[in-house]
Amino acid sequence: MLFQNGEYSGHCIDESTYISSLNQFATFIRFIDKDNKLKTAILDIRLLSSKGASAENFLLTFYETCKDYGLDLNNLMGICVYGAQNMIGCRHSMTQMIRQQFLQVTIDHCCVHRLNLASLDSIYATELQPLRSAEAITQQLWHFLLHLLCLKPNQRIYTNQFKMDK
């Protein structure tokens, strides 16, 4: 087992529903291995039961995953989840139910999901049009430079203009 030497662990949990209404529950694990190196691995991806995306179903699926991999939840230090109410809500969520049983667990809202939410909010803001224009120009410049670097030296037009200091 990849993480059998890791005494303490943290988990990142995500749930996604695809167009076909297929609910999947993904669990990632972070731990310190026997060489004191931080490791991250996909622990499990499994289908949620027919009970759907409820906090109870998430909790049951998480407990089953931990049991299947022989993880002691008394050594669980943290959980990182996306911001859905049933995952991280303050009243009746999976993380609150875990926290009631395991007081040592730190709960965190995933920064990637938070960034995605902030990005979606900002896309629709009308006052950010100059920023979107600047982003488009930056992407065009990036693609131009990438294409330039991929060309063979004898195909490059601007070879002498872009010299890098060593």
Image: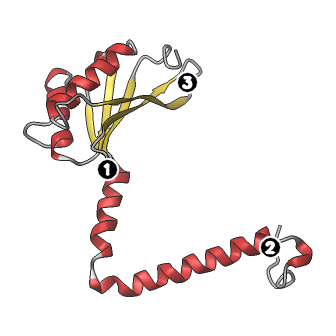
* Residue extending furthest toward the left: 91
| Residue corresponding to mark 2 | 164
> How many numbered marks does the figure carry?
3
Q: Residue at x 21, y 27 (%)?
A: 59
Can residue 102 be seen here? The reply is yes
Where residue 155 sits in the image (x, y, percent)? 87, 78
Q: Please report whichever mark, 3 or 2, sits nearer to the chain's N-terminal start.
A: 3
Residue at coordinates 34% horizontally, 66% vertically from top-left? Answer: 119
The residue carrying mark 3 is 36
- Mark 1 or 3, nearer chain start: 1
| Residue position for label 1 | 19
Marks 2 and 1, how far apart at CA: 48 Å
Q: Residues within 10 Å of mark 2 (few under 14, many from 20)?
A: few
The amino acid beneath tag 1 is: Ile
- Residue 140: name its quadrant: bottom right
Mark 3–mark 2 Cα distance, whole angstroms, equals 38 Å
Asked if the residue at tag 3 contacts the one at tag 1, i.e. Cβ–Cβ closer than 8 Å, the answer is no
Mark 2 or 1, nearer chain start? 1
The residue at 89%/73% (across/down) is 153
- In the rendered view, would you say 162 is above or below 50? below
Residue 45, x across and y down, in percent: 39, 31
Q: Secondary structure at mark 3?
A: loop
Residue type at mark 2: give it.
Answer: Met
